[in-house]
Amino acid sequence: MIKLAVLPALILFFYVYKLDKIEKEDSKLLIKLFLLGAATIISAIVLELIGMALLSMFFEKGETAYIFIANFLVVAVAEEGGKYLVLKKNTWNHEEFNYSFDAVLYAITVSLGFATIENVMYVLDGGVGVAILRALTSVPGHAIFGLFMGNYYGLAKRCEQQGYEDGMRKNLRKALGVPVLLHGFYDFCLEMNSGWFLGTFLVFELGLTILSVKKVKKMSKQDVAL
């Protein structure tokens, strides 16, 4: 069962890894990013427990406001924030970070580290059905959030190299903010537990997946030195 839970993340990782064609990254760095990304499950759980406890003091669980704040400002911030901190701390000044596509590979690696541990937890509890469902939704979802994080992270690095400080700060904010918004909306639609929101989620998931596949291929072809 654990192998079934881990497999989707590995498949996605090697797919993106093969798209990094100009200069392959140090395997030790990638393993480190994957493991540290996996470790952020701990901080995410702690922050989410605290956030939910505080939230329940002001809203009833199940209220639209509760669901909105819980998913956008608690879960999404806790999870994407942890990934971002791991990414920034371990790659920003690393000598290997010298091509634009490196940012995408790094961010997706961190995200898939988190997704792997999260998936194992859910699959061990829910079984094969949950494994199949999450292999098609949640695990690719985390990879997509990582793609957008890496996109803006790479732009921020390029701005730094060009001495454009405002652009660097702006893109670093987007590297965290855009994944938080995507993640929050993703979870919010599912948590609302209604047919309309489920339909919205399916359209969102399909459209975002198609866009992301095209985007990652395009970024691979347009990979340039920083």
Image (cartoon, helix red, strand yellow):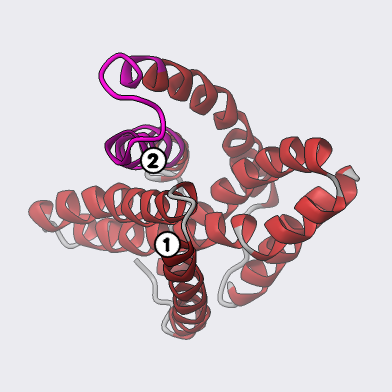
Q: Which amino acid does label 2 sit on?
A: Asn
Q: Can you see residue 96? A: no
In the picture provided, is 100 more to the left or to the right than 172? Answer: right
- The 10 Å Cα crowd at callout 1, few under 14, some 14 to 19, many 20 or more, is some
What residue do we see at 80% from left, 49% from top? 5
The N terminus, quarter of image: top right
**Element at label 2:** helix
For residue 197, the mark is: 1
Q: Can you see residue 131? A: yes
For residue 71, the mark is: 2
In the picture provided, is 192 more to the left or to the right than 15? Answer: left
**Which region shows up in magenta?**
53-81
Magenta segment includes 184: no
Between 24 and 118, the one nearer to me in the picture: 118
Q: Distance between the residues labelled 2 and 1?
A: 14 Å
Between 146 and 65, the one nearer to me in the picture: 65
Q: Can you tell which quarter of the image residue 94 is in?
A: top left
**Element at label 1:** helix
Which percent across, then down, holds residue 53? 40, 15
204 w.r.t. 153: above or below = below
Which percent across, then down, holds residue 52? 41, 22
Between 215 and 169, the one nearer to me in the picture: 215
What residue do we see at 32% from left, 47% from top? 176
Which percent across, then down, holds residue 159? 20, 60
44 w.r.t. 212: above or below = above
